[in-house]
Image: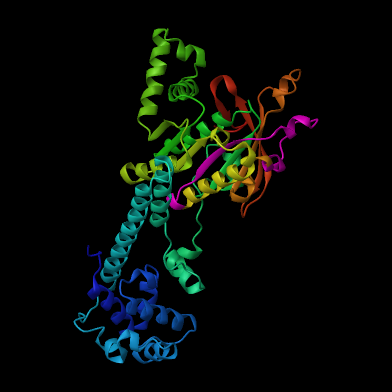
Amino acid sequence: MNLPTNVDAERFVLGSILLQDGLYLQAASQLLPEDFSLEKHRRIFARMSELRERGEKIDRITVANELMRLNQLEACDGLTYLVSLDDGLPQIPNLDSYVDIVRQDSGRRKIIYAAQGITNKAMLREETPEKLIADATTTLRDLYQEKRGKAETAEEIIAEAGGVEAFFRKKPGIACPWRKLDAVIAGWKPGSLIVVAARPSMGKTTFAMNAAWGMATRNIPTNFYSAEMEAQELLYRQLSCLSGMLYDDVASGEHSKDERAALNAALAEITARPLRIIEASGQNVMSIRSHAERTKERSGLGFLVFDYLGMFRVDEKNRTHELGSIAREFKLMARSLGIPVMLLVQLNREAERRSDHRPQLADLRDSGEIEEHADLVMLLHRPGYYVKDQPDLKLAAEVNVAKNRNGATTVVDLLYRGERFRFEQEESEPR
């Protein structure tokens, strides 16, 4: 079987750089030495990379000298071959096309090698089908998100950003539904992992659903993965939130003419927005990521919520390590997809032992060092849940921005209307 390769495209990439060494960065942003099919091409590109790192000019003589120093010139067919690399090259080289051909063929070869490895394992019958599928998914995912020619120097970083103007341009996140909170966090940032943590009954799911709906109303495609609640239950909650009706009345199936009109209007609003509610009970991170990637490819995806971390099956003996690994996978998912990812987490019981019951960042420790992987950590607290005899605390809700990468940390006060599944701004503020 002949593996996918295009030797002429490889020659033209190398020949273009030898003619104009300024083109090296353009090629190196997409290719690594191992992407070339021929060993001599891999060696030539590697020597070019070393010359560039030392700040030296790349041309036939310097590359030949570098190969000679490492006793590799003869293995690369000598100076004559270096001179011939631009034979047949058009007067106006189309470097992007050559690079793309080399990159794609390299990717195809890696997929073939990976498939052969999985096939060999399956033939040996030493692993379960589930383990084989998980390994195959991980391998293909790693190939999919493989970074090539990662920018390192200031010049490369600025070029990758799109130039000096783009580099210095402010990149705010997407506004969240609560103005006071938005002023602190500057919106949901693409590529960030947002952890919303609380003890039970503090309103984690409601907060996350409100955040998801805020994105959907901006026509940003949003996936809400629920490992705890059924999709119908979440839809009832959103109908209650929008219609103003109580959950039990929404779900009762018995509605007055006015109630049905209100529900129809709310349902029309929901169906007009790009919000998907996906039941994810029993799924693992890889299946969620795979679904999210397919969604983004087919119809777009700009925001993702998972409710909640504790629903993943883990080995209790290694709980801390495994939950930490899962949080890391969600962070990698956010970066790979280039979207904000919100992960809900249930805190340990330490807050229950404090006199004020307020959660602290340290309460995440039992859940796998999640703080390390999160860009933003918000701890929810409702003092009225614990103090029943103070009416003024009934609606009080606190969002403790306990970690905010490159930003301030503070407590933001909101109102919690649990019967309508809404977190709102304070009454003196616009909703």
Q: Position of residue 59 (x, y in %)?
A: 36, 88
Q: Where is residue 88 in the image (x, y as percent from the top left)?
A: 18, 82
Q: Which residue is drawn at 41% across and 17% down?
A: 262
In the foreground, 219 or 309:
309
Query: In the picture, which quadrant includes the N terminus?
Result: bottom left
On the rendered structure, is 413 left or right of 25? right
Q: Where is residue 153 in the image (x, y as percent from the top left)?
A: 51, 73
On the rendered structure, is 412 left or right of 282? right
Specify whether residue 400 is painted magenta.
Answer: no
Query: In the picture, which quadrant includes the C terminus?
Result: top right
State the image quarter where residue 51 is shown: bottom left
Q: Is residue 349 above or below residue 240?
A: below
Magenta segment range? Answer: 336-365
Q: Is residue 294 above or below residue 112?
A: above
Tell me, yes or no, if residue 346 can be seen here. Answer: yes
In the foreground, 364 or 118:
118
Q: Is residue 83 above or below residue 231?
A: below
Query: For the image shown, how many numbered marks are present on the structure?
Result: 0
Q: Which residue is drawn at 48% across and 48% down?
A: 334
Q: Residue at x 31, y 43 (%)?
A: 298
Rendered image coloring scheme: rainbow
Q: Residue at x 56, y 32 (%)?
A: 207
In the foreground, 233 or 365:
365
Q: Where is residue 326 in the image (x, y as percent from the top left)?
A: 54, 44
Tell me, yes or no, if residue 175 can be seen here. Answer: no
